[in-house]
């Protein structure tokens, strides 16, 4: 059973970079895409982007200028960096396995608050 | 981007009754070469991540109860819970995976009447 777990700071200051890591267990990262999705408190879901296990990325154009997703298959991890954070980036951030667009395994999510 | 619009935003249904949620995409998510609709449904219970229920518009994920069914093609889709159970209280989202960026509907909150 594939499991994903997000980790990283729960509080980020405005203008700083939000950084999160997702650790994958119970399965290989090979042959899959790996996505980040976020959900502002009380609101809907927004796909941030994905990375293929070999490092190819695809980002949501709405965030593309600020997003970097990287992968380290030796550690079974992939990471998200979102620069120039603002209060609008406050959200629960989820990582998920992306099977050609189907998000079939999700982490539990981690709340990141952007505030001074 | 493909815009996904769900209706209603919320609905209250009595236990054992049918709940129906609609989802409309701003452009077709039917891929003509394989005749598949790139449309999924997710269930999100409070404090939990979304759970994949349905893919290819009508295929239940393994372990999903048969009371959940879905249909539709092109731009118009429906999720039906045939006999609402207490554990079905959740927010339901449709999602298109026809083209990036993957996009979701705004969600439909299902409650017990």
Image (cartoon, coloured by chain):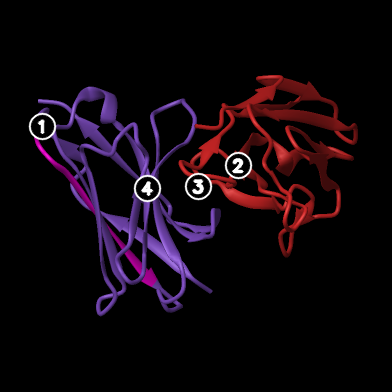
Chain colours: A purple, B red
Nearer to us: label 4 or label 1: 4
Label 4: chain? A
Q: Quadrant of residue A76?
A: bottom left
Q: Is residue A5 left or right of residue B96?
A: left
Tally of marks:
4
Q: Is-magenta flag for residue A17?
A: yes
Q: Residue at x 75, y 39 (%)?
A: B86
- Same chain under badges 4 and 1? The reply is yes
**Marks 2 and 1: same chain?**
no
Q: Which mark is residue B96?
A: 2
Q: Is residue B102 left or right of residue B8?
A: left
Mark 4 or mark 1, which has the lower sequence index?
Answer: 1
Extent of the magenta region: A16-24
Quick check: do tags 2 and 3 share a chain? yes
Which residue has dot 3 on it? B49
Question: Is residue B113 something one can see in this rendering?
Answer: no
How far apart marks 1 and 3 lie (CA) works out to: 25 Å
**Residue where numbered disc 4 is placed:** A49
Pointers 2 and 3 in contact (C-beta within 8 Å)? no
Q: Quick check: A4 above or below A50?
A: below
* Secondary structure state at the residue bearing disc 1: loop
Q: Real-space Cα distance between discs 4 and 1?
A: 23 Å
What element does badge 3 sit on? loop
């Amino acid at each position: 059973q594939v499991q994903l777990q997000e980790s990283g700071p729960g509080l980020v200051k405005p203008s700083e970079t939000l950084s999160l890591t997702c650790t994958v267990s119970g399965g290989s990262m090979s042959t899959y895409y790996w996505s980040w999705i976020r959900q502002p408190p009380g609101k809907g879901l927004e796909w941030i982007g994905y990375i293929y296990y070999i490092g190819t990325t695809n980002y949501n154009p709405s965030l593309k200028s600020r997003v970097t997703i990287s992968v380290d298959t030796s550690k079974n991890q992939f990471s998200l960096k979102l620069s120039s954070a603002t209060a609008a980036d406050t959200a629960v951030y989820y990582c998920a396995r992306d099977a050609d667009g189907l998000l079939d395994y999700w982490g539990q999510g981690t709340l990141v608050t952007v505030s001074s | 981007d493909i815009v996904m619009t769900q209706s209603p935003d919320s609905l209250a249904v009595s236990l054992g009754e049918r709940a129906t949620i609609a989802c409309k995409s701003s452009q077709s998510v039917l891929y003509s070469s394989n005749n598949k609709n790139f449309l999924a449904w997710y269930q999100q219970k409070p404090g939990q991540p979304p759970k994949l229920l349905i893919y290819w518009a009508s295929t239940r994920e393994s372990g999903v109860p048969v009371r959940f069914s879905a249909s539709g093609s092109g731009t118009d889709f429906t999720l039906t819970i045939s006999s609402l159970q207490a554990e079905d209280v959740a927010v339901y989202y449709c999602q298109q995976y026809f083209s990036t960026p993957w996009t979701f509907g705004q969600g439909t909150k299902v409650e017990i009447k």
